Every structure is written in structure tokens, then in C-alpha cells.
Image (cartoon, rainbow, N blue to C red):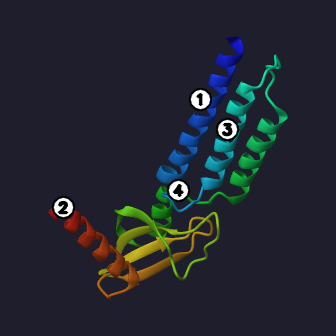
Amino acid sequence: MKRRSKILFEVILYMALILLTYYISHYIYADAYNMRYAARALTLLIVSTLTEWRKEGKNLRPKWEVYVVLGIVIIVFLATKPKYTYEQGKELLKEQNFTGIESFEVRSLISFKLDRNYFIQSSYLYIGDKNGEKYYLQVHPKSGEIDSLKVGEGNYIDNYLKLKKEKANSSKNI
């Protein structure tokens, strides 16, 4: 029984870490930072732990693979994490004299001008005013670069939000 409770604890711990990576990715970095690598590695640990459970043995020490996988996940996170959170992106915009900064339901979107890679696939998305004009504002999570597009010019963000609204309306009509 002691071995089963230890394995159950390990599995619950890994599941909690998967939920933590989801929380960090979704709420802190607005889904602009891709943490799927961490969820996959932790899922691999769950499978490994459950496979080990079926084997016989009295060794209750954690496996060295666990430390290696957790270490790799932590190192990759520290090396690739964005410099700015979603809320810090708002502060960067205020420093650039944008006012009335608001969020959308979609808090991140691919930018065609700002850099992207496996870990940072999109930029934070806001709407704000500058000199009496409304702009879509994108902030790169790693570098803090800002890209702005005027609202209502028929740009890709206008089209995306229009399609999203149409899709929501058609879903309600069904």
C-alpha cells in the first residue's frame, strides 16, 4: 500500500504541474508563450510512473529520469520565457503614450511584423488610443517591440475579429 500511495502522489503532483503550466501559459502569458513542451514532458513522466507501478520492486526513491526531465523543463522555461507578461505589456504601451488600453477576449494573436518561434508564436493584443486614433496594438512578449495597426482599415486583425464575431453569431442561431 505504501508504494501505491507514493505512486498516486507522484501522478497527482505531475498533474498539478501540468495545470500550473496551463495557468502560466494562459493567464500570465495570454497564450503567446507555448508551454506544450512542458505538458508533454510531464505526461511522459505520468506514463513512466504508471508503467513503473506495474513492475515489482521495493525501491521507493524517485527515479533519476524524473530529475532529468524536470530539470530540462525548468531550464528550457528559464531560457525561453517571455520577458514581459500580458499586464506588463500594457505598461509598455502606456510608456509609449497610448491611452485607453483595453484587452480583447482574444489576448494574443500572430503578428506578421514581430518575430515568432516555437516558444513565442504570437504577440499580446490590445486596443488603445493615440492622438485621437484607435489602434490595434501588439506587443512582443520577449523583446517588448510594439506593432500598431489602425482600427477599421480592413487589416488582418479587423478581418479576424469580424470573422470571429460572425462565427459566434452563427453559433447562437443554430
Residue at x 60% of width, y 66% of height: 120
Residue type, label 1: Ile
Sequence-wise, the earlier of marks 4 and 3 is: 4
Residue at x 72% of width, y 48% of height: 73
Q: Confirm whether residue 96 shows in the render.
A: no
Check disc 4 and report the residue beneath it: 29
State the CA–CA distance, disc 4 to disc 3. 28 Å
Check disc 2 and report the residue beneath it: 172
**Residue nearest the observer in this picture, 131 or 114:** 114
Crowd rating for badge 1 (residues with CA inside 10 Å; few <14, some 14–19, many 20+): few
Check disc 3 and report the residue beneath it: 47
Q: Splitting the image into 4 quarters, where does residue 58 fall?
A: top right
**Residue nearest the observer in this picture, 95 or 93:** 93
Q: From the viewer's perspective, is residue 39 above or below residue 166?
A: above
**Residue nearest the observer in this picture, 34 or 92:** 34
Pinpoint residue 64: horizontal percent, then vertical percent: 84, 34
Residue at x 61% of width, y 73% of height: 116
Residue type, label 4: Tyr
Would residue 104 be found to the left or right of residue 123 on screen? left
Crowd rating for badge 3 (residues with CA inside 10 Å; few <14, some 14–19, many 20+): few
Kindly indicate whether the residue at mark 1 contacts the one at mark 2 (C-beta within 8 angstroms).
no
> Could you tell me which quadrant the N terminus lies in?
top right
> Could you tell me which quadrant the C terminus lies in?
bottom left
* Furthest-bottom residue in this view: 153
Sequence-wise, the earlier of marks 1 and 3 is: 1
Sequence-wise, the earlier of marks 2 and 1 is: 1
Check disc 1 and report the residue beneath it: 12
Pinpoint residue 70: horizontal percent, then vertical percent: 74, 41
Q: Splitting the image into 4 quarters, where does residue 35 fall?
A: bottom right
